[in-house]
Image (spheres, rainbow, N blue to C red):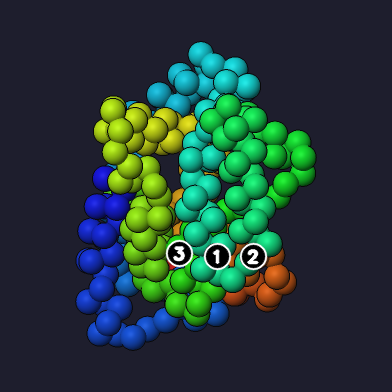
Amino acid sequence: MRVAFAIFSAALSLTACATTGVEQDNSTVYDPLEGWNRGVYGFNESVDKAVLEPVAKGYRAVTNEPVRGGVSNFLSNLNQPVVFANTVLQGKPGAAIETATRFVLNTTVGIGGIFDPASGLEVPKHREDFGQTLGTWGVKPGPYLMMPFMGPSNLRDALGGGIDRAFDPMSYATFEGDTAFRVSTGVAGALSARESLIEQIEVLREQPEPYIALRRNYSQQRAAAIRDGRVQEDPFQDLPEFDDYDFGDEETEE
C-alpha cells in the first residue's frame, strides 16, 4: 500500500516537473500542486483525528515505555537491510559496517531486535533511504507532495520509497504466514510512529498555517539528512516567521 500511494502521487506530478523544469530555489519549497496537496493534507487530518490519533493515544495508555520501545526497536531492526543497502550505494563503508554490526547484534543477542544491545555497545545507528541516496547523487527533490495516509514527501522521496521496498527482504520473502506478518508489521509501524509524534503533531496544529509549517520542516529535515550534518547555509532562511507573517489575502509563501 505504501508503494502504491507513493507511485500514484508521484505520477500526478511527473508532467508538471517535466514540462516546467523548475527546481527548488534558495528561498521557497517548490509546490506546484499546492491545491491538490492541501486537499490531501485535509483528508489526512480527518483520518488522523477520527482514527489514528485516538488509537495512538489508546496504545500509549495501555502500554508502558519499555513495551513501546521494544516494538520500535523490532521495527527499526527489520529496516536495517534497507539502511545497509543505501549506505553502500552512498559510498559509506564505515556506516555500512556499523549497520551490519547493529543488525547482527540486535537480531541475535537482542532477540530479533526487541532489545538494542548495539546501542549499549555504542554502535552508531544510521537512518538512510533511497530518497537520501538520490539526493547524495545530485538528484533534486522535485515538487513537494502530500501522500494520502502517509504525509509529506516529494517526487524524489516518493520514487525512492518504491526502491527501498525492493531492498527490503521482507517484501518478497516467502514463509508460512508471510502476508499476515507484513500486514501486522505495517500496522504496528504506523501505530508506533503515530504514538511517537503525538506531541509534535499537537504543536504543529497550533501553528497559524500548519500546512506551511509541515512543508518547511519536512524539506529542511530531508535536506539536513542528505548533508549528514554538514554545515550549510539554511536554504529556507528567507522564509517569514509565522509570528510576523500576514495570512490575509496574500499568497501563503512567496
Q: Secondary structure at mark 1?
A: helix
Amino acid at the residue labelled 2: Pro
Q: Residue furthest top?
A: 62
Residue positioned 76% across, 36% down in the render: 120
Mark earlier in primary sequence (3, 2): 2
Percent position of residue 169, x then y: 39, 47
Labels 2 and 1 touching (C-beta < 8 A): yes
Q: Residue furthest right?
A: 121
Mark earlier in primary sequence (2, 1): 1
Can residue 235 be seen here? The reply is: yes
Residue on which the image places disc 3: 131
Can residue 251 be seen here? The reply is: no
Residue on which the image places disc 2: 93
Residue positioned 22% across, 66% down in the render: 12
In the image, taking residue 187 as reference, residue 218 lies left or right, namely right
Residue on which the image places disc 1: 88
Crowdedness near tag 2: few (<14), some (14–19) or many (≥20) residues, C-alpha within 10 Å: few
